[in-house]
Image (cartoon, rainbow, N blue to C red):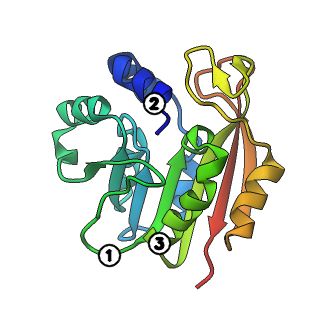
Amino acid sequence: MDEKTASFYRENASGLFDFYRSAGTPFDTDILNVFRPGERVLDGGCGSGRDLKKLLERGIDARGMEPSEELIRLTLEADPDLAGRIRQGAFPDDVPDFPGGGFDGILLSAVLMHIPDRDLSGLTSALKSLLRPGGRLILSSASERDDVTGNRDRTGRLMILRSREEILRIFEDAGFRLIRESSSADGQNRPGVIWYTAVFHLPA
C-alpha cells in the first residue's frame, strides 16, 4: 500500500474503526443475492470487520484481509469470534496464504481507489488466482469526492476516482464479466461522495 495511505490508517485506526462500524454498507442486497450460505468468501480489505460479520451472519464461510495491523487489533478486541479469520495483507503484492483453497467470491469495499495504475494488472491477477472457476467479485469504489485533488484526498491518502467506464475496462480486459452495477450516495451522508458498485463473474 502507498506509504502515505498506510500511515493515515495507522495513525487514525481508532477513529476509523468507529466510523466504519457506524457506516452503512452498499453490499446488503448483493451479499444476499450473489453469495450463498456455505460458500467461501474473502473480504479483501475488511477494515473494522463490518462486512465480514454480515457475511458470517448469513452462513457464509468468510475470511478477511486487512493491511492495517491496528485495525485488525481493534476488530479482534471488539469481536473475538473473528479470531483466525483475518490475516494482514494488501493487494496486489502482499496477499497472505489462506489455507483451504480458493474462494467462491471476493468483496472489495473501498479498495480500488487506493490502487495506483501501475498495480492494476497485479490486482486483477491476484484476484483471479484467489477465485475459483465461476467465482464472483463485488467491488465498491468512490467515483466522486469533492475533497480530492491530484489523486489525494485532504488527509493525504491515495484516492483515484475511476469512472464506471474505466472500472469496466480494467476488469473486462482481465476476463471478468459484469453482472450488475449501481451508484449510491455515501452511507454516512457525506456531501459530494458517490459510490459505484459492480458485481462481476469470472467465467470458468
SS for callout 1? loop
The residue at the point 25 percent across, 29 percent down is: 74
In the picture, the disc for residue 3 is 2
On screen, residue 196 above or below 188: below
The residue at the point 31 percent across, 58 percent down is: 96
- Cα–Cα span, label 3 and label 1: 10 Å
Report if the CB atoms under discs 2 and 1 are less than 8 Å apart: no
In the picture, the disc for residue 101 is 1
The residue at the point 26 percent across, 73 percent down is: 100
In which quadrant of the rendered view does residue 124 lie? bottom right
Which is closer to the viewer, label 3 or label 1?
Answer: 3
SS for callout 3? helix
Work out which residue is located at the far bottom of the displayed protein and give it: 204
Report if the CB atoms under discs 2 and 3 are less than 8 Å apart: no
Depth check: give the residue in front, 132 or 95: 95
Mark 1 is surrounded, within 10 Å at the Cα level, by few (under 14), some (14 to 19) or many (20 or more) other residues, namely few
Residue 144, position as x, y percentages in the image: 75, 30
Depth check: give the residue in front, 168 or 125: 125
Residue 131, position as x, y percentages in the image: 48, 72
In the picture, the disc for residue 129 is 3
On screen, residue 60 versus residue 34, left or right, reads: left
- Give, as a three-letter code, the residue at label 3: Ser
The residue at the point 36 percent across, 34 percent down is: 48
